[in-house]
Amino acid sequence: MSKINVNTSEYSSVQFERMSTAQCEKIHWASLEMLERYGVKLHDQQAIDLLKKGGADVDGNLVYVSSGMVEKAFTTVPKRVVLYNRHGEPVMPLEGRRSFYGPGSDTLNIIDHRTGERRKPVLNDVREGIILCDALTNIDFVMSLVLPTDVDQTIADTFQMEVILNNTIKPIIAVTYDLPGLIDSVEMAEAVMGGVEALRRHPILTCYINVVSGLNHNAEALQKLLYLSGKGLPSIYIPSTTAGTSSPITPAGAVALDNAGVLLGLVLSQLNREGAPYIMPGMPPAPMDMRTMVSPYAYPIRGIFQAMAQMYKLPAFGLGGSSDAKIVDQQAAAEAALTLLAESMVGGNIIHDVGYLESGLGYSFELLAICDDIIGWIGAFMKGIDVSDDALALDVIKKAGHEGSYLATEHTRRHFKSEWYPALFERDNYSTWEKKGSKTMSQRARERVEKILAQHQPESLPKDVQAQIRNIVEQRVKTSKV
């Protein structure tokens, strides 16, 4: 007898909607009104000229962009961006609600996992952090983690990129101080991948571009956007304000303001090169804590920009796995878990800043290792539920009977390894935990970090590629001294 199903549906993941389409449209329309009526200040003449040629009205450095220009840009921008690893494998397809996780960049302090000391980072901390990221299975991409103080601060980004490329095969999100630093990073990546076209076809790198605000675009940000889009490489364009100080305190108003800048960057990238990959922010402006005047990282109002990105069908760059705590304590673990879960549920594609402490001023390898377990837990939680005949196991239940055991069944042997097993979360009974030293989560995390650093050997670059990268660094050093 045929089995006919009508209007059946299965969920392949947890379902969650942060905002309705109507809510997103209101924010979009508000952003369009700003672009058309208020205009945007641009501090780069090339960008102004390009927009004017594309149909924008220009008054000095104030540019008015029409809704039609925005709509046209949406017809050419890719709805999917893929980042590759060093082997040219497509390991980060940024599409739909697929989430990928990695650290942040350029923190001013690090909590030394060996001593517990809060200190200024050095270049070796970048190296160890990248090795750790290379080994952790739930970390998908890398960033520079900390700002090394033992190299020339004006060109530290170039030193960071050399260390990153030599110690991981994973995709890279660069943060550079200026256009020359970005050019260095791209040229190093081209050396790794085998040339300009090889990198364009298989981008292992993109850049996080900081923009003053949605209505005020600094020259450095515009230059980076034009450079990357001109090469056909993906760019992450992030107008970034603080709600209550540089944007409205209300989430909708703050997002609408920065989203106007997102749309401006989109138009500019497509005018510069149609089809240039473009990634938008997934981080709503953090509200200033008016009691402390600190801009928090673990704030609960999240997912607005991701909802906008899903309406636009563009990849989104989010933030999670970070904390406003000063050390790795209960607050740090709670905030890291909450932000990672929230960002995953709202569908952020790139979730960065995993391992951040003290509102972005400090970094912890220990917290990064803990977050690796948290991400694994979230991955297991977000999966759909198998309700196949094999999963329902009616025959197994019948055979076991009313008082049967399932431990030795073939069904259990086939399925138990598909369950999630933690690397750090404690599941022993109390006496076994005591026999193993009664170690806390922090102690276990520190031991795991040290074990990885002692044993993990990242895949080396060929010697000639290492030499090309070193030459780029040396040329930057010479240029900086002129």
Image (cartoon, rainbow, N blue to C red):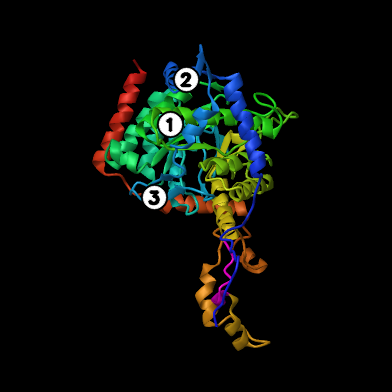
Where residue 158 sits in the image (x, y, percent)? 39, 30
Instruction: Pick whichever of labels 1 and 2 is earlier in the sequence.
Output: 2
Magenta-tinted stretch: 384-391
Above-or-below relation of 424 to 398: above
Q: Is residue 388 magenta?
A: yes
- How many marks on residues? 3
Helix, strand or loop for disc 2: helix
Q: Is residue 230 left or right of residue 369?
A: left
The one nearer the camera, 324 or 250, is 250
Q: Is there any visible trace of residue 122 in the rendered image? A: yes
Question: In this view, which residue lies farthest toward the right?
Answer: 291
Question: On the picture, is 23 further left or further right than 181?
Answer: right
Q: Residue 332, located in which quarter of the rendered image?
A: top right
Q: Which residue is mark 2?
A: 219
Q: Residues within 10 Å of mark 2 (few under 14, many from 20)?
A: some
Residue 129 picture location, percent across and down: 47, 43
CA gap, disc 1 and disc 3:
24 Å
Q: Which mark is residue 90?
A: 3
Magenta-colored segment: predominant secondary structure: loop
Q: Amino acid at mark 1?
A: Gln
Identified by mark 2, the residue type is Ala
| Amino acid type shown at disc 3 | Pro
Marks 2/3 in contact by CB < 8 Å: the verdict is: no
- The circle on residue 270 is 1
Pick whichever of labels 1 and 3 is earlier in the sequence.
Answer: 3
Residue reaching furthest top? 60
Q: Residues within 10 Å of mark 3 (few under 14, many from 20)?
A: some
Secondary structure type for disc 1: helix
| Frontmost residue, 69 versus 440 | 69
Q: How far separated are the C-alphas under marks 1 and 2?
A: 18 Å
